[in-house]
């Protein structure tokens, strides 16, 4: 089982040799190296722990595999992530049909330690919105307009009290900063909602206007640009393992050489024959530096420890208006931040309370107010 798992993952032969402390020019076949590693892990618990920690990213569990392992639905997986039951190891990105998409992966050790009893207990827990420090209205019946209006009024009353507390116990500047941060969360969420709708339309071969998605992301970028100027903001840079986007296309001759010499894949071949490939006029290799890196913005004040907001901006977008990464402090890992983490589409209840029109009005007002303090 472990041997199959290692073989199925893109772990370079050189990495496996390094783990065993063997020289890079070792001529052993990859299968033999894998077998050696399995034997070492079975005999030594400390080496087993070192192995899982060394290759935690390579052995991470993606959403599809996680749902199969836990025998759960996508909705259950998402709910358990938001509740903190399934910690996220890191986020990864890919492009499909011209859309930039992200997905979480999880430490395999954590997933393997879950039992059927754990899953059954999670399913028995009451379902609902993730708890956080901002006001929530009661659950909504989207078919009942009177109840929807009552829920909107309840939220509005709770929100006004929050604003008053920020001003009275903090300052007008804190209130302006927090209000912009709050409505930027919802701007990001409406952007994600339109992105998801666009993706669904593409899958269904339908036409979908991406203008609103782009407009909402642009508003989020405007807010981030303003928020970093506020005294309650801290901007970091997150560079994950494998931050660079690599592209490799081997010519026919090098493809044949790769197959004849039993290389694991084209990347192992490239790492062992880098100079030769780079000199070849037919092979294509390119690197996009920090393609998967992120700017990470955190908004908080010691006067209100129960409130915090955080946002990410992909480096490829943020580099146009945010400081150079070398001028910023680094974070080794951006932790899970509940609903304020990397954005998500809206829940149906949220669409009733935070309508697109209302969020736009509140966002623009908050942005204008925050700019008075810059």
Image (spheres, rainbow, N blue to C red):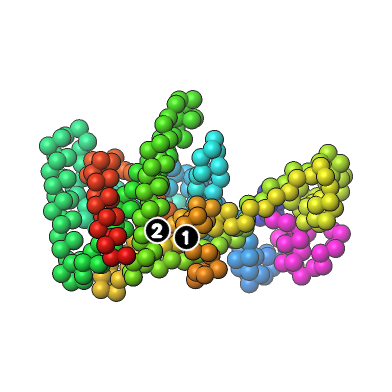
Q: Which residues are magenta?
A: 11-38
Left or right for 70, reference 367: right
The residue that appears at 16% across and 51% down in the rendered structure is: 156
Q: Is residue 12 visible?
A: yes
Relative vertical location of residue 306 with respect to residue 10 in this rendering, above or below: below
Residue 24 lies in the magenta-colored region: yes
Relative vertical location of residue 33 with respect to residue 219 in this rendering, above or below: below
The residue under label 1 is: 322
Q: Check disc 2 and report its element: helix, strand or loop.
A: helix
Task: Tell me, yes or no, whether the two marked residues, 2 and 1, touch with CB atoms within 8 Å.
Answer: yes
Left or right for 168, reference 54: left
**Sequence-first tag of 2 and 1:** 2
Residue 25 lies in the magenta-colored region: yes
Which percent across, then down, holds residue 325? 53, 65
Q: Quadrant of the C terminus?
A: bottom left
The residue under label 2 is: 225
The residue that appears at 22% across and 52% down in the rendered structure is: 136
Q: CA distance from mark 2 to mark 1?
A: 7 Å
Which percent across, then down, holds residue 45? 63, 70
The residue that appears at 25% across and 40% down in the rendered structure is: 357
């Amino acid at each position: 089982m472990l041997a199959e798992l290692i073989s199925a993952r893109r772990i370079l032969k050189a990495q496996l040799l390094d783990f065993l402390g063997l020289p890079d020019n070792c001529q052993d076949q990859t299968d033999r190296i894998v077998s050696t590693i399995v034997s070492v892990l079975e005999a030594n618990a400390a080496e087993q722990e070192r192995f899982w920690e060394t290759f935690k990213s390579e052995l991470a569990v993606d959403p599809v595999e996680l749902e199969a392992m836990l025998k759960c639905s996508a909705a259950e997986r998402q709910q358990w992530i938001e509740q903190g039951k399934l910690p996220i190891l890191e986020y990864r990105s890919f492009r499909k049909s011209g859309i930039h998409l992200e997905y979480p992966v999880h430490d395999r050790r954590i997933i393997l330690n879950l039992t059927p009893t754990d899953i059954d207990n999670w399913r028995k827990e009451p379902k609902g919105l993730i708890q956080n420090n901002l006001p929530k209205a009661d659950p909504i019946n989207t078919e009942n307009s009177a109840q929807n209006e009552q829920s909107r009024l309840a939220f509005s009353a709770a929100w006004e009290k929050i604003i008053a507390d920020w001003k009275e116990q903090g300052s007008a500047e804190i209130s302006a900063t927090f209000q912009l941060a709050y409505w930027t969360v919802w701007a990001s969420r409406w952007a994600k909602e339109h992105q998801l709708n666009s993706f669904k339309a593409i899958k269904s071969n339908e036409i979908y206007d991406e203008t609103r998605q782009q407009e909402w992301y642009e508003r989020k970028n405007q807010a981030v640009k303003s928020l970093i100027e506020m005294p309650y903001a801290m901007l970091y840079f997150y560079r994950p393992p494998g931050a660079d986007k690599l592209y490799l296309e081997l010519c026919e001759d090098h493809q044949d050489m790769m197959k004849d010499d039993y290389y694991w894949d084209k990347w192992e071949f490239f790492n062992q024959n880098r100079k030769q490939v780079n000199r070849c006029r037919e092979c294509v290799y390119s690197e996009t530096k920090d393609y998967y890196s992120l700017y990470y913005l955190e908004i908080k004040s010691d006067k209100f420890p129960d409130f915090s907001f955080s946002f990410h901006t992909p480096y490829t977008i943020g580099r146009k208006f945010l400081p150079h990464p070398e001028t910023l402090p680094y974070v080794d890992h951006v932790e899970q931040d509940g609903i304020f983490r990397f954005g998500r589409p809206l829940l149906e209840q949220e669409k009733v309370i935070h309508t697109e029109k209302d969020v736009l009005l509140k966002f623009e007002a908050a942005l204008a107010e925050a700019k008075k303090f810059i």
